[in-house]
Image: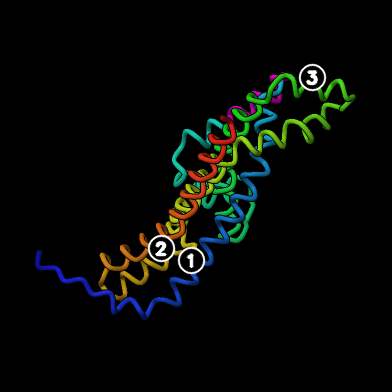
Amino acid sequence: MSYSFDFSGLSQGYDELLDGLRITVELTIAANLIGVTFGFIVALLVMSKLKVVRIPAMLFVEFFRCTPAIIQIIWFFYCVPILFDVYLESITMGILALGLNLTAFNAEAYRAAIQSVPKEQHDAGIALGLSPLQRVLYVVLPHAVRSSVPVLITNGIGIFQQTALVAIVAIQDLMYQGKALATTTYRPIETFTLIAVIYFAISFPIAQLVQAIERRREVASR
């Protein structure tokens, strides 16, 4: 191979890459807040006995789980303003698109966790005179959160990586800045290698944390 790697030219873009990383982290945190919060609510709606509530919730989940995230992002950016006359800042649209995508996946994680709540705990809540809302808040929610933490974190890592898709709609995240740097330096291999290393350096420790949590739960369950 005659190609010689040269990373020295990338130093001129470090500030822009850091700015892009900041936006990527902001997108990730905001999307996770939406996904973790509304994912539980959607899970409850999916499990509702009322069809008028359950069916729309199921359609919402299946739509976001069964269509590519990049299509969802493009749809939000170009279709929402046209169809609903709603104009928001680009980063806000990115947060909404990613947050709703994560909500759908987290809803399934919560649903599985809710279904694993022992019947005895439900019966104990009824015996204590708790209202349905109190049983959800004090019995179902704590158990569901504990059981679904590894999946929620894994989904959070996935959304961190999917933030790279917003570069296609000109949000100046890490990937957008990387593309700009590759264009100005004529060093796409080195640039995208560096970008990959940054994503890996952030994702890998969190993935290891998930494994540690799962191992601890296995030990505790023995």
Q: Is residue 213 left or right of residue 15?
A: right
Which of pointers 2 and 3 lies earlier in the amino acid sequence?
3
Q: CA distance from mark 1 to mark 3?
A: 48 Å
* Main secondary structure along the magenta-highlighted residues: helix
The nearer-to-camera label among 1 and 3 is 3
The residue lying at 44 percent from left, 40 percent from top is: 68
Amino acid identity at mark 3: Asp
Q: Find residue 69 and report its horizontal and vertical position in percent.
A: 47, 44
The residue lying at 61 percent from left, 55 percent from top is: 30
Q: Which residues are magenta?
A: 49-59
Residue 123 numbered mark, or none:
3
Q: CA distance from mark 2 to mark 3?
A: 49 Å
Residue at the left extreme, as displayed: 2
Amino acid identity at mark 2: Ile
The nearer-to-camera label among 1 and 2 is 2
Q: Look at the numbered disc 3 and give the secondary structure of its residue.
A: helix
The nearer-to-camera label among 2 and 3 is 3
Quadrant location of the C terminus in the rendered image: top right
Q: Is residue 103 left or right of residue 171?
A: right
Which of pointers 1 and 2 lies earlier in the amino acid sequence?
1
